[in-house]
Each structure stands twice: as structure tokens, then as C-alpha cells.
Image (tube, rainbow, N blue to C red):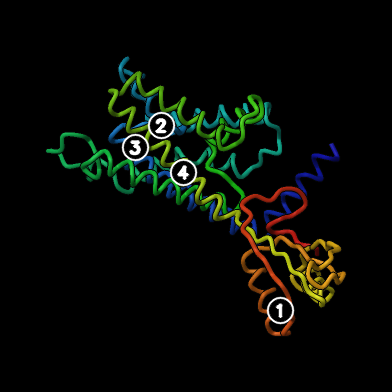
Amino acid sequence: MDTITNYLKSGLRYACTWKFWKEFLILTLGMFVAAAGVYYFLVPSKLVIGSISGLSIVVSAIFEQFGIVVKVSTVVLIINAILLVLAYFLIGSEFGIKTAYTALILGPMMDLWAVICPYEKLIDPSSAVPSVMGDLWFDLICFVLILSISQTIMFSINASTGGLDILAKIVNKYLHFDIGMSVTIAGVVICCTAFAVNPFRLVIIGLIGTWINGLMVDYFTAGLNKRRRVCIVSDQYDEIRSYICDHIQRSCTLFAIEKGYTKEKGYEVEAILTKEEFSSLMAFIKDRDIKAFITAGNVSEVYGLWSKHKKLR
């Protein structure tokens, strides 16, 4: 009971911070963008991309064949709710409230777009296919771009759009695939369900869209997670170490070295920094006229004690 009370108090304190409201706004805007992509570019053309939204279109179409009208947004809400329950028991409570929030508001956001501007008003009645852009490939490209933007927004604050991400995490945990492969597997399986309601051509378009979306997500994720590994050899290593630890507030590692030409003993300073922190360090070395040999390379993934937000203090 004390644990629950402490957890609620901690949650209330966090809810009173600017960080909470800023992330809440970003999450809401990000899902508002994602809902627009689903509502305007997937629902009219019935394209099925490897996502929960695509699966929802299939389920809605199957019910429609039996004369039962179920809105896609309603199916999205139900499937996401089921996945959140599975995630709680199969992945753990650490899954986080952010994903729960984003997953559950996608359906209502789609309904909101339907009120603001129904997609029927944007479709040319003379068009051979029910498409906002007038062409399925244009619809596919627009959806993938919009979804990638939304996912980038989510990833920037360590959140996700829910749905497929939940399924991918379950696949990752129990089938032991890496997370990228898990997303691909989950997406392809969902996309293939479209054979029940769509012709072969539309399913192939959906599979291509799933593949493109995976590439774009990988690209944007790598860009967001990119860090700099900087290695510095200098006689003023302690001054550099002090700046990294005390000013930038990052840790670093000192390696004892022997210079190959002069045989002098010394130290190499190695640190993992953000792009802004790396620029600050380079400006410091330049301003102090520190003589140093510096190499730097990109690191796309960092695990363990290093944190994007939490520094040494």
C-alpha cells in the first residue's frame, strides 16, 4: 500500500512540472499528425500498411461484408486496448504511460479529423479509385511521410505511437529477434491479412509501403540517437577531462598510452557526447589553444549508464 501511495505522489509531482506538460503536448500533436495520415490516406483507399491501423481497416472491412458497420477508429481503439493489456502482462508495467496514452487516443483523433474535414469532400467522384490524392502510390507516399514524421516526434521524447510497437516488443521478448526485425515481422504479418479483403495488387503496394516505412523509421531513429565518440590524445588531458566532467557534466575514460613515434607515455581521453556537447568541447579546445590529436565518429546506439537527459548532476 505504501508503495502505491508513493508511486501516486511521485506521479502527481511529475504532473506538476513543465516537462510533463511539454511532453503531453508533443504526444498529443504527434498523434494528431499520425491520425491525419491514417484517416486521409489509408481509410479511403483501404491501403493496408503493416500497422495496427492497417489491421483495423481489414477487420472493419470483414465486418462490413456481414452487414455490420464498425468504424475503423473504433477498431483501432479496441485493438490498442487489447495490446496494452497484453503488454502489461507479457512485457511488464515499465511499458509506460506514454505509450498507453498515444495508443488510446489514435481512434478519437481520427474521429476528430472526420468532424473537421471528412475525407469524402476531398475525393474526386470521377476517380477510378477512392483516393484523396487520386493515385494509390501518392497516397502511400503521403502516409509513409506523415507516419514517419509522427514517429520521429514520438522517438524524440522516448515514446512510441503504440499499436505495432507493442506487438513488436512482444515478438522481440519471446522470439528473441532484434527490435528492428520484430517491427518488420509484425508489419508483414499484419499486411498479409489484407488478402482477406483486398486484391493482390493492393496487398503488394501495402508490403512495399511497410518496407519503405521501416527504412525511414530506421533512418530517423539513427539520426535521433546519433552520438559522437571522441578520442583525444593530448598532454593537457587533465584540463580536457575536467571540462568534460565539470562543465559538460559527462563522464569520460582515460587510457594509458605510449606514443608510437616518441615513445612518450601519456593518456587518451574518450567520451560519448551529443552533437551540441561535442561542439562545445571543440570550441573549448580551440579557445584554449590546446595541442591535441582528435578523432571522432558517429555512434547510433548507446546503452547502459549513458543517458540523453540525465547527466552527472
* Crowding near the residue tagged with mark 1, few <14, some 14–19, many ≥20 C-alpha atoms within 10 Å: some
Among numbered discs 1 and 2, the one appearing first in the sequence: 2
Element class at badge 4: helix
**Cα–Cα gap, marks 3 and 2:** 7 Å
Three-letter code for the amino acid on which mark 1 is drawn: Ile
Among numbered discs 4 and 3, the one appearing first in the sequence: 3
Element class at badge 2: helix
Among numbered discs 3 and 2, the one appearing first in the sequence: 3
Three-letter code for the amino acid on which mark 2 is drawn: Gly
Q: Does 119 sit left or right of 126 as displayed?
A: right
Q: Residue at x 87, y 69 (%)?
A: 265
- Image mark for residue 312: none
Residue underneath mark 1: 285
Q: Does 285 sit left or right of 168 as displayed?
A: right
Closer to viewer: mark 3 or mark 1: 1
**Cα–Cα gap, marks 2 and 4:** 18 Å
Three-letter code for the amino acid on which mark 4 is drawn: Leu
Residue underneath mark 3: 42
Among numbered discs 3 and 1, the one appearing first in the sequence: 3
Q: Tell me if label 3 and label 2 are in contact, CB under 8 Å.
A: yes
Three-letter code for the amino acid on which mark 3 is drawn: Leu
Residue underneath mark 4: 215
